[in-house]
Image (cartoon, rainbow, N blue to C red):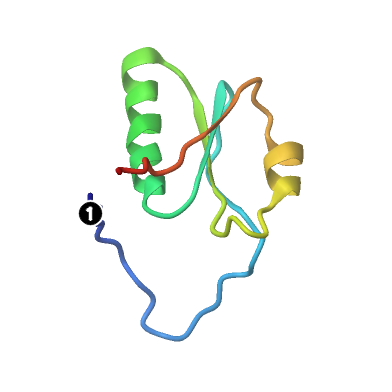
């Protein structure tokens, strides 16, 4: 299975700090946590949940999984439910 996405990429050099997650979308009902290409899936899911169910989703991009930002996920999370999404393994 191959997943691709198209997104704007900075022209100049840039760095992404290791173990520092990014909160992409604030929400109050559920927190969705993922990394890599699954972030694009989560953004679509969050938008659908809001439009069709009225569910407000917080979306967190871990950016790195080792080390991962436990402080952001555990401390900043203001919703009662946290769901982690990862790519499926096909054998």
From the image, tell me which residue sits under label 1: 2
The residue at the far bottom in this view is 12
What residue is at 59 percent from the left and 55 percent from the top?
A: 65
Q: Is residue 20 left or right of residue 3?
A: right
The residue at the far front in this view is 91
Numbered disc 1: secondary structure: loop
Q: Is residue 44 above or below residue 28?
A: below
Q: Quadrant of residue 75?
A: top right
Say which quadrant the C terminus sits in. Answer: top left
Q: Is residue 44 left or right of residue 59?
A: left
What residue is at 40 percent from the left and 38 percent from the top?
A: 42
Q: Position of residue 78 (x, y in %)?
A: 68, 29
What residue is at 57 percent from the left and 59 percent from the top?
A: 64
Q: Position of residue 10 (x, y in %)?
A: 39, 76
Q: Is residue 55 above or below residue 9?
A: above
In the depicted view, which residue is nearer to us: 1 or 46?
1
What residue is at 57 percent from the left and 52 percent from the top?
A: 62
Q: Is residue 16 above or below residue 52?
A: below
Q: Position of residue 71 (x, y in %)?
A: 76, 47
Question: Badge 1: how crowded within 10 Å, few (<14), some, or many (20+)?
Answer: few
Q: Is residue 45 left or right of residue 16?
A: left
Q: Is residue 86 above or below residue 8?
A: above
In the depicted view, which residue is nearer to us: 54 or 66?
66
Q: Position of residue 33 (x, y in %)?
A: 54, 40
Q: Quadrant of residue 82?
A: top right
């Amino acid at each position: 299975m191959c997943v691709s996405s198209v997104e704007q990429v900075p022209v100049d050099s840039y760095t992404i700090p290791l173990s520092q997650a990014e909160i992409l979308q604030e929400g109050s009902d559920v927190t969705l946590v993922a990394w890599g290409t699954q972030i694009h899936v989560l953004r679509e899911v969050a938008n659908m949940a809001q439009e069709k169910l009225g569910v407000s989703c917080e979306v967190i991009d871990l950016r790195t999984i080792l080390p991962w930002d436990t402080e952001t996920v555990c401390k900043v999370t203001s919703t009662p439910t946290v769901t982690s999404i990862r790519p499926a393994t096909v054998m």
